[in-house]
Amino acid sequence: MKFNWGLFLVALTISVVGIIAIYSAVYGTELENLYLRQSAFLLIAIGVMFIFWRIPIRIHDGLAYIYYIIIIAILGITLLQSGEVKRWLGFGIFRIQPSEFSKLAMVLIIGRWIRDNLKNVDSVKTIAVSLLLIVPPFFLVVAEPDLGTGIVFCVLLFVMLYAGGVRPLHLFLLLTPFLAMLSAVHWIVWVIYMIILVSVLIKWRIAPVKFIIVLTMAIFIGTSTPYVWSKLHPYQRERIMVFLNPHHDPFGAGYQLIQSKIAIGSGGVLGKGLLQGTQTKLAFLPAKHSDFVFSVMGEQFGFVGVAILLFMFWVLLKKILDISSSARTPFASVVAMGIAGIIFFQVFINIAMTIGLAPITGIPLPFVSAGGSSLITFWAMIGILQNIHSQAIEPQ
């Protein structure tokens, strides 16, 4: 079977960079040996990649709906634990985070549904059922609470529907509830959004029934947003407030973001050097080995260092898109696009939140942030991509 060495090496390079960043972040602290743990997880993850490389993609196609039942069951079991945070399942000295594995499972599940309905992918039924498929896992992970993974489900659905052939108009209508909720932060913004929505619906000559349904949904969601806001966890509301104004709570919820921006800005062009970051060494920056590992890299390796990292992510995504375009089956092509969507979104959001362009959501930086479940999941994705590549249509 063909093996895409370019894909493997760029993912490996990013992962090694992540271990170096983790080592630099935790050096001299009680977590000093965390980089060794991450290195062990990397070896396990690469082994998982080779296993997934050897599993034909048609097997995942056939088992996709069984994966759905399994992932719903595991996420449900996770919620049966005691405590306010229920994201992990413990097995002796090991802990796994099922919500990370559920990202890959949902890619395969949505891919199977799109493949089953490829001739009618643009129909209301196909899109509606796609939405219904993500509802149970979405609410299960949000209840953990893990809002970041819930958002990832929504993004991968959007990307995969587009890859499957859903028209931009229907994708816009799919975004309408989300846009209505965002615009409801102020009544003037909401009114402007409603005017734009009505204009778009008229321009695209939407059927009267669809017109009424979409408009009614937008009005309902917009007016119910205050209720949804009241049901958010206090820390989630704080994160949104801090995103809008980091100095809203500079010594509490806003502290992370302020210190992150200081760390990145202080790195300058070339950075302060490995183990030389003051924000990191003096422990001003929280979650520096996980959600804010990009801030560590910005401080110690500067603009040049993070630019090289972003270039490696660009190369990785380019290779994934090439694999998607040469895939032998529609299922394989859509799955590859779903994986690309997850990686791009998590890279974008993780970096955006460290520089204040997005709310802090707890989404890890792929292959870089500390965490075994996340690392294994992304390398399993690489394994699936390797299998798709091994069966790709040869260029003429």
Image: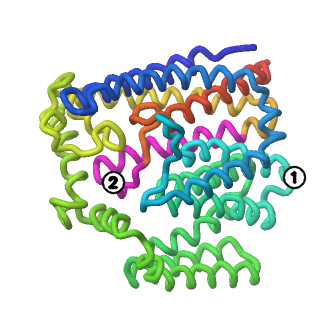
Secondary structure mostly seen in magenta is helix
Q: Can residue 355 be seen in this view?
A: yes
Q: Image quarter for residue 211?
A: bottom right
Report the amino acid beneath label 2. Leu
Relative to 185, residue 312 above or below:
above
Q: What element carries label 1?
A: helix
Image: magenta residue range: 334-362
Relative to 91, residue 352 above or below:
below
Identify which residue is drawn at 63% across, 17% down.
Answer: 4
Disc on res. 238: none
In this view, which residue lies farthest toward the front? 92
Q: How crowded is mark 1: few (under 14 residues within 10 Å), some or many (20 or more)?
A: few
Disc on res. 357: 2
Q: Locate residue 380 relative to residue 11 in the image: left or right.
A: right
Q: How crowded is mark 2: few (under 14 residues within 10 Å), some or many (20 or more)?
A: some
Q: Position of residue 199 (x, y in %)?
A: 58, 77
Disc on res. 119: 1
Relative to 149, residue 143 above or below:
below
Identify which residue is drawn at 63% across, 84% down.
Answer: 216
Q: Position of residue 364 (x, y in %)?
A: 42, 42
Q: Locate residue 180 relative to residue 370 in the image: left or right.
A: right
Task: State which tag comes first along the sequence, 2 or 1.
Answer: 1
Q: In which quarter of the image is the C terminus?
A: top right
